[in-house]
Amino acid sequence: MRAADVARALTGTPTDSLPADPGPPWRTVAEIGARPDYANGLPTITTGFASLDHILQGGFRKESTYALAGRTGTSKSTLAMNVARKVALSGHTVLIFKLEESAREAVYRMHAAAAQVSLDLLLGGPRRLNPQTHEKLTDGWSLISKLPVRISDQRDLDAMSRISAEHVKQDGGLIIVDQLSMVEVRGTEFGYERATTISNHLRILARDLQVPILIVAQVNREAAKKKNERLGVNDLRDSGAIENDASAVILIDRVRKPDGPEYSGAELVRYLQIVVPKNRYGPIVEEVPIELFWWPQTCRIEEIVRCDPEVPT
């Protein structure tokens, strides 16, 4: 007997007044494969860094969450903002939940990176700028002012979900949460319970909205003290659900000065050494880290271009 007939027998309600039977709450393999989007796979969005894209097999994959963490002072938020700038430059609209600092300061950092000007000069106001610096800032502003980047300071998890849905409705792509510890969840305690709730919620949100979500997180106190030991997934603060839900865990393991005579006196440049101890769609990176250039004063991070030695002919 059909569901509608059962309802009529039990309630006496005519079947034509009942909503249409939605069918079973599942789909068969054949039905999933017949969907128009099946042949498209799960497309990726570039991270903006070729070395990271290579390890992640193309970049951030739709319907996935990614954890980005590091010790204090290792530029995890700066890396997230540089990812946002580069992803936007590639044509994808980015939503950033900036929870540790104001949206205004976040734009200052993005402006400094684009103009390659010290952040201190921007924070100090226009009276400290000479004509050359002002010209660089004007050029930098022209690079970022029209970027499809949206910034929100909303902390409530439910409100963040609504904003994210509107972002995707208006052709949005990558979502960045900076950072997890600042997200507010009603009815939960601090620590493991809240981190688990947030991580699970964001994982489901990424799947439902079919976009990648990058979550900036912290490492625990023990890992922060052990600066000579390689970071791993167990070093995430309140870890458990975070690494389980994430398709990849990206850790800024160490910061070091560049070596070689060509960098002599380059005190303002640093190497970021990045490991990927969990990677659902690609190789694990632990022993030989990925390296990126970081200019702390200008909040800029770039790919390292190494020239191969000439092969004699």
Image (tube, rainbow, N blue to C red):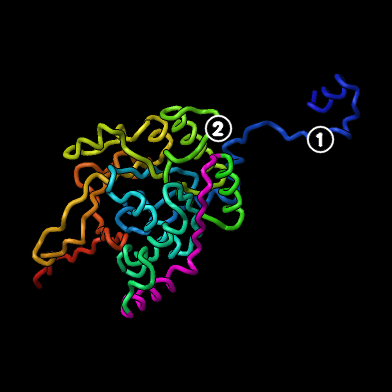
Judge whether residue 132 is colored magenta.
Answer: yes
Using residue 305 as the reference point, say whether residue 63 is left or right of it. right
Q: Mark 2 near mark 1, Cβ–Cβ under 8 Å?
A: no
- Residue 243's disc is none
Badge 2 is on which residue? 186
Label 2 crowd bin: few (<14), some (14–19), many (20+), radius 10 Å:
few
Q: Which residue appears at 38% of the width and 29% of the height?
A: 240
N-terminal of the pair, mark 2 or mark 1, is: 1
The amino acid at mark 2 is Arg
Residue 198 % position (x, y): 48, 35
Residue 147 % position (x, y): 48, 66
Badge 1 is on which residue? 19
Q: Residue furthest top?
A: 10
Real-space CA distance between mark 2 and mark 1, rounded to the nearest whole angstrom: 35 Å
Figure quadrant of residue 218: top left
Q: Nearer the viewer, residue 30 or 213?
A: 213
Q: Which residue appears at 20% of the width and 35% of the height?
A: 226
- Depicted 228 relative to depicted 273: above or below: above
Figure quadrant of residue 118: bottom left
Quarter in which the N terminus is drawn: top right
Label 1 crowd bin: few (<14), some (14–19), many (20+), radius 10 Å:
few
Judge whether residue 47 is colored magenta.
Answer: no
Residue 155 % position (x, y): 51, 43
Using residue 12 as the reference point, say whether residue 180 is left or right of it. left
Element at badge 1?
loop
Q: Residue furthest bottom?
A: 131
The amino acid at mark 1 is Pro
Q: Which residues are magenta?
A: 131-157
Q: Nearer the viewer, residue 178 or 309?
A: 178
Element at badge 2?
loop
